[in-house]
Image (cartoon, grey):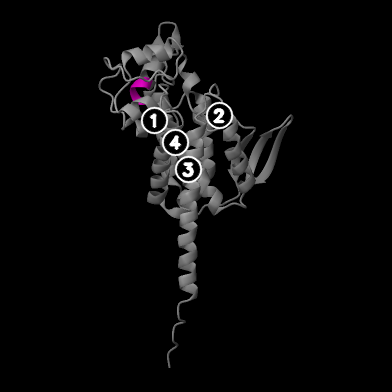
Amino acid sequence: MDVAAVHSRIGRGAVIPMADENPIQRVPWVTLLLIGACVVVYFAVQPTGTPKLDWTGIVERTDQEDLRFVVENAAVPCELVQLRPLTRTEYVETFRDGNGNACSDDGGPAKSPGKVVLLAVLVTMFLHGSIVHLFGNMLFLWVFGNNVEARRGWWRYLLLYLLGGIVATAAHVAADPSSTVPIVGASGAIAAVMGAYLVSWPKARIKTIIFFGPLLLRKVEAIWLLLVWFASQFLLVSGDSNVAWAAHVGGFAFGALVGVWWRFRDDRADRAVVGAPAPVGGA
């Protein structure tokens, strides 16, 4: 099986955000570092993006090497449920026989005996299945992430990103616990950022490319763009979509809830300031 066939994507909808009209006052260092980390991992660590020199020139590595790398490092629902790596039998049934739900309790030798399956939940956020997958995720992260980071501070933003990715993976596992197909990509974590952005700036205008017959460039309010994106995930429920729709939904819902909590705290702080007694003037 080609490893590109099992990757998660931020969405296959007909809209692509290019930029927002929401200015930032500081450099979004964490967003830039996250983007840089994903790019470096893809091109310098993953076989998918790492060319090798041959006497014929630069060639791509084989799909089998890509697949082996992903299985050894990415999160797999069956592994997280069973808290152990895939067995060799499960690996063969999945990637030779095409059974994506080959999880079993039969035991047997592990395909990747040294794999730490819980650590893979974090690692999988920095892996991508193709250049298109990487570019799409990083574009969404830049458009929506820089404002959230600037507004909430770097550590809250980073915590939202990482916890959002974990919640997204948990949602995917809950939706398909017997899956033996790896899930890769930052999509779930970025969906959490998008959910927080929606709550914080629902009226922000987003410059968006719309594929609807002719190619259109329009400014769309965030509330409509992001709700359409969210609703479109439920069109991907079909088992052959190769998109981790539940991870997107779970991450987005988590981010929106965090955004609501942040707004509640902001409103409470504003009311406290308004209700404070005015300072007493001097004689």
Residue most extreme to the front: 105
Residue topped by disc 1: 124
Does the magenta segment cover residue 104?
A: no
Residue at x 42% of width, y 10% of height: 96
Q: Which mark is residue 94?
A: none
**What's the amino acid at mark 2?**
Val
**Marks 4/2: CA–CA distance:** 13 Å
Judge whether residue 29 can be spotted in this image. yes
In this picture, which residue range is highlighted in magenta? 71-75
- Mark 2 or mark 3: whose residue is earlier in sequence: 3
Residue topped by disc 4: 171
Residue 76 image point, x, y percent? 38, 26
Residue most extreme to the bottom: 283
Judge whether residue 193 can be spotted in this image. no
Residue 147 image point, x, y percent? 51, 49
Residue topped by disc 2: 237
Q: Quadrant of residue 37?
A: top left
Marks 2 and 3: CB-CB under 8 Å?
Answer: no
